[in-house]
């Protein structure tokens, strides 16, 4: 669980063991031994699950009452192949689908564009128009499943496909459930799959949130992501810092549009990575919830504990895996 970062431990067998230095993968130094004297007095240490600032979880019963939604992230080359996979997952009891798009779809290129050559269907499904999305979801009951779409610069287009499909099937879009990543800022920080400059990207993101709050109230219209930032080389501390900073930009933008943040906060979600150092990751998630509650109170005057629940999706970081 802990790794040694001192070269002398390997190079010099004469080095006393007491001089060994231990750090987490984020470079945070760890003492050899911890005891009662190391516990810092803090009012949140005595809180229970479901109590503000929710460092022990947002549900009083933890996940004993209801398991979290587990989504198998997938997007095969074609809509037909992905549809087949989705139907298999549903037959095995999955209630939440997670959709991966190829790079041309993510940044708005047609599959026959010369710039898309070699990338069509490579890291996700190719969706070049509504017809592809309709084929992708053929035979899948939109009332029974929630759909998570990992899409950012073109999120408003894929969301429109989702919305129109519901209308075409005679369903009220208000019953649609799911999550859109719709987090363009982290594309400029970590991934690079942006299609427009920061200003227009932020405007499109906010437009989608505006529309979704009115017409698809059960959809989370934005998932503010630290995962990709961590994968790009950030430490656990960096991951939280950039993610919460991005969150303030989105909230400031929506507030400037006249939104009451109290109506927006219940529809915000987050996305964090999970590395191998269990205790560091637990501390990171607890810190995220504590900092979120403080940020809402100090920056926006939000004191209602029910609005300070930081809901997040977590995913194993690929950089921690071995072949």
Image (tube, rainbow, N blue to C red):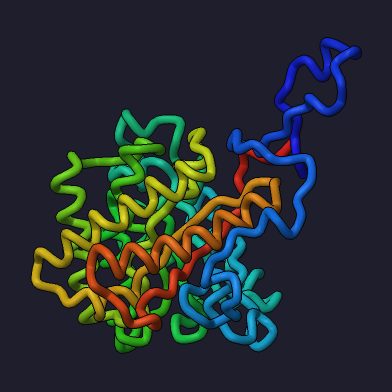
Q: Which residue is drawn at 53% across and 71% down?
A: 44
Q: Where is residue 152 in the image (x, y as percent from the top left)?
A: 33, 52
Q: Quadrant of residue 198?
A: top left
Quadrant in which the C terminus is drawn:
top right
Q: Would you place residue 114 above or below residue 131 in this image?
A: above
Q: Position of residue 21 (x, y in %)?
A: 73, 29
Q: Would you place residue 229 above or below residue 300 in this image?
A: above
Q: Residue at x 49, y 65 (%)?
A: 312
> Which one is nearer the viewer's eye here, 261 or 287?
287
> Which one is nearer the viewer's eye here, 246 or 115?
246
> Which one is nearer the viewer's eye here, 90 or 236?
236
Q: Which residue is drawn at 51% across and 79% down?
A: 145
Does 284 sit left or right of 33 as displayed?
Answer: left
Q: Is residue 137 visible?
A: no
Does 132 sit left or right of 288 as displayed?
Answer: left
Q: Would you place residue 25 above or below residue 223 in this image?
A: above
């Amino acid at each position: 669980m802990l790794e040694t970062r001192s070269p002398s431990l390997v190079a010099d067998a004469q080095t006393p063991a007491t001089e060994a230095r231990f750090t987490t993968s984020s470079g945070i130094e760890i003492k050899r031994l911890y005891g009662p004297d190391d516990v810092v007095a803090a009012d949140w240490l005595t809180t229970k699950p479901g109590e503000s600032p929710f460092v022990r979880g947002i549900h009083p019963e933890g996940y004993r009452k209801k398991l979290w939604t587990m989504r198998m992230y997938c997007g095969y080359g074609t809509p037909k192949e992905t549809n087949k996979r989705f139907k298999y997952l549903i037959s095995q009891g999955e209630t939440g689908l997670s959709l991966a798009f190829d790079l041309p779809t993510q940044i708005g290129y047609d599959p026959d564009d010369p710039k898309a050559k070699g990338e069509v269907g490579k890291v996700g499904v190719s969706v070049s128009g509504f017809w592809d999305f309709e084929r992708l979801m053929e035979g899948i009951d939109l009332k029974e499943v929630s759909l998570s779409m990992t899409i950012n610069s073109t999120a408003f287009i894929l969301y429109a496909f989702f919305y129109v499909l519901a209308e075409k099937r005679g369903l009220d879009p208000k019953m649609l459930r799911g999550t859109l990543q719709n987090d363009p800022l982290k594309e400029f920080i970590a991934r690079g799959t942006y299609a427009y400059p920061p200003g227009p990207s932020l405007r499109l993101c906010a437009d989608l949130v505006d529309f979704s709050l009115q017409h698809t109230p059960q959809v989370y219209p934005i998932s503010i992501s630290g995962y990709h930032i961590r994968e790009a080389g950030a430490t656990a501390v960096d991951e939280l810092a950039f993610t919460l900073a991005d969150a303030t930009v989105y909230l400031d933008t929506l507030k400037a549009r006249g939104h009451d943040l109290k109506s927006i906060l219940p529809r915000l979600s987050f996305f964090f990575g999970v590395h191998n150092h269990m205790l560091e990751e637990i501390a990171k998630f607890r810190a995220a919830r504590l900092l979120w509650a403080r940020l809402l109170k100090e920056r926006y005057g939000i004191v209602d504990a029910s609005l300070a629940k930081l809901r997040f999706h977590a995913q194993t970081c690929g950089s921690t895996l071995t072949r």
